[in-house]
């Protein structure tokens, strides 16, 4: 938590790996994994005399991203060389974009504790990824793997509009959701498909000038980003309070120690010595080309959210959650078509499914079951065949093995007890064994009824019909 007399200022450079089949300037595969240096050729290895050829799909996907984030599209764009000397960059420069990015002046809207907030996007440009260094565990050196070199990226550069780690997480999740919906990337953070360079500075509340910023590179988990921002903001405040100057530098976040460490001085644009890429022609886009891409965009989260509230009666919270991921949204829509109970489906996604994913430290894209299974599960509750308590157990089973819920409850013997005579026997037994709770209820303590129902559910291993239980308990207690 940042001190009340300081304000943290955060801007992000989000790198998103595009899901094209081939690299940005050659025909090598972009498939993740593979033995080192098996997805490369003379072009992406930067052999002398080779020439790049721009992958048209990369331009299409970048324009899609721009339109989906309310950007203007540059009809006369170009590629540039960004010069820097790293071992994993075989050309000693990166083909990127400098003064004429494909997309500019956009924004996305995020939900904060104070309501909606617009985060401005300065630009979205295309560029190639670098290779990867594999460090020898025995300290004998590092090995370069160029499988990733030349994989196409878009870089989404925000304005410094975020003021907390919570806003940054909301912004990152919103971008991830949009890119999943428009199907330009798998956004698998654990594979580096979505990662961020995080720029952090602090200033006194009310100050107009920004403080000196530091940059934390290549962060690829929401948890790490949040922790790193909170730590770095506190570190900078402490330095300032002790009379020290903040250095503009690039930092490395160590997730184990929970600290940042200096890597090198932070470069400015002039350090990269940009100049137009001489081996590639300019990118010229027609109005018709841009309009055709606009028409191909699927329904985006904001539109779906509005429809879920108006057509399905979801609360704003449930609708926000349902559209927060394409995988949640598709699950919701498919299940609702089957069971015609959108509120229960929405609540189940927001509470039970999200809880299990969180416990397993997994993202929605890891869900193996579909709306078909979820829809049947909700139908079984509505028909009184299983209770909500049993439904939670069925969900746990679905995470382990995908089967139709009706099959699971048959195998496990979890069909709900709705026989009034059988439940009456349980009710009488619980009343007999809990005389004090009966006395408490009759003395006006309504919570005692909940305790008695809970004991009956425990006795029946969650299989008793809860509505029938309540009815029979009340009948007996009022005698």
Image: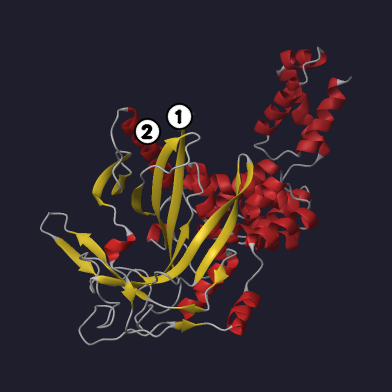
Helix, strand or loop for disc 1:
loop
Where residue 237 is drawn, which disc sits there? 2
Assess whether mark 1 and mark 2 are in contact (beta carbons under 8 angstroms): yes
Of 181 and 31, nearer the camera is 181
Rendered residue at 12%/54% (across/down): 139
Q: How is the image coloured?
A: secondary structure
Position of residue 48 relative to residue 330, above or below, is below
Mark 1 neighbour class, 10 Å CA radius: few under 14, some 14 to 19, many 20 or more:
few
Of 447 and 320, nearer the camera is 320
Mark 2 neighbour class, 10 Å CA radius: few under 14, some 14 to 19, many 20 or more:
many
Helix, strand or loop for disc 2:
helix
Q: Which residue is mark 1?
A: 3
Q: Residue furthest front?
A: 208
Query: x, y percentage for residue 194?
Result: 43, 60
Q: Residue furthest left?
A: 140
Position of residue 248 relative to residue 42, above or below, is above
Left/right of residue 388 with respect to residue 8 in the rendered view: right
Rendered residue at 54%/68% (across/down): 65
Quarter occupied by residue 45? bottom left
Please say whether residue 414 is visible from this viewpoint: no
Of 281 and 44, nearer the camera is 281
Quarter occupied by residue 393? top right
Rendered residue at 32%/83% (across/down): 278
First in sequence: mark 2 or mark 1? 1
Rendered residue at 66%/63% (across/down): 372
Position of residue 181 relative to residue 381, above or below, is below
Quarter occupied by residue 73? bottom right
Left/right of residue 267 with respect to residue 208 in the rendered view: left
Position of residue 26 relative to residue 321, above or below, is below
């Amino acid at each position: 938590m940042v001190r009340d007399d300081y304000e943290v200022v955060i801007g992000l450079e989000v790198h998103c790996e595009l899901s094209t089949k081939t690299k940005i300037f050659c025909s090598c595969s972009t498939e993740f994994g593979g033995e080192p240096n098996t997805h490369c050729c003379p072009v992406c290895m930067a052999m002398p005399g080779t020439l790049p050829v721009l992958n048209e799909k990369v331009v299409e996907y970048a324009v899609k991203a721009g339109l989906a984030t309310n950007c203007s599209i540059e009809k006369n764009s170009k590629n540039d060389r960004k010069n820097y000397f790293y071992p994993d960059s075989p050309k000693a420069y990166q083909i990127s974009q400098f003064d004429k990015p494909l997309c500019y002046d956009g924004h996305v809207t995020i939900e904060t504790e104070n309501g909606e907030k617009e985060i401005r996007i300065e630009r979205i440009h295309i560029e190639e990824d670098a290779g990867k260094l594999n460090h020898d565990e025995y300290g004998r050196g590092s090995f370069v793997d160029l499988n990733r070199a030349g994989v196409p990226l878009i870089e989404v550069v925000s304005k410094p509009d975020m003021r907390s780690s919570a806003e940054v997480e909301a912004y990152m999740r919103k971008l991830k959701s949009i890119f999943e919906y428009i199907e330009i990337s798998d956004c698998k953070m654990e594979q580096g498909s979505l990662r961020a360079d995080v720029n952090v500075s602090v200033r006194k509340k009310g100050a107009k000038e920004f403080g000196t910023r530091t940059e934390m590179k290549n962060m690829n988990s929401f948890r790490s980003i949040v922790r790193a921002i909170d730590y770095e903001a506190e570190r900078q405040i402490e330095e300032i309070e002790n009379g020290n100057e903040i250095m503009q530098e690039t930092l490395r976040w160590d997730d184990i120690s929970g600290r940042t460490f200096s890597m090198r001085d932070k470069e400015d644009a002039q350090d990269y010595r940009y100049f137009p890429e001489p081996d590639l022609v300019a990118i010229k886009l027609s109005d018709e080309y841009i309009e055709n891409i606009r028409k191909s965009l699927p329904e985006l989260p904001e539109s779906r959210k509005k429809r879920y509230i108006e057509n399905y009666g979801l609360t704003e919270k449930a609708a926000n959650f349902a559209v927060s991921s394409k995988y949640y949204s598709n699950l919701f829509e498919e299940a609702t078509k089957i069971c015609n109970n959108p509120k229960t489906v929405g609540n189940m996604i927001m509470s039970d499914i999200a809880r299990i994913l969180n416990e397993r430290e997994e993202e929605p894209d890891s869900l193996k079951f579909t709306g078909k299974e979820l829809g049947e599960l909700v139908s079984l509750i509505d028909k009184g065949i299983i209770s909500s308590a049993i439904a939670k157990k069925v969900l746990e089973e679905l995470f382990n093995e995908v089967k139709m819920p009706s099959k699971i409850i048959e195998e496990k013997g979890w069909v709900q007890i709705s026989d009034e005579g059988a439940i009456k026997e349980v009710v009488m037994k619980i009343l007999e064994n809990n005389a004090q709770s009966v006395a408490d209820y009759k003395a006006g303590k309504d919570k005692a009824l909940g305790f008695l129902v809970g004991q009956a559910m425990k006795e029946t291993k969650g299989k008793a019909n809860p509505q029938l239980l309540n009815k029979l308990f009340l009948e007996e207690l009022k005698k």
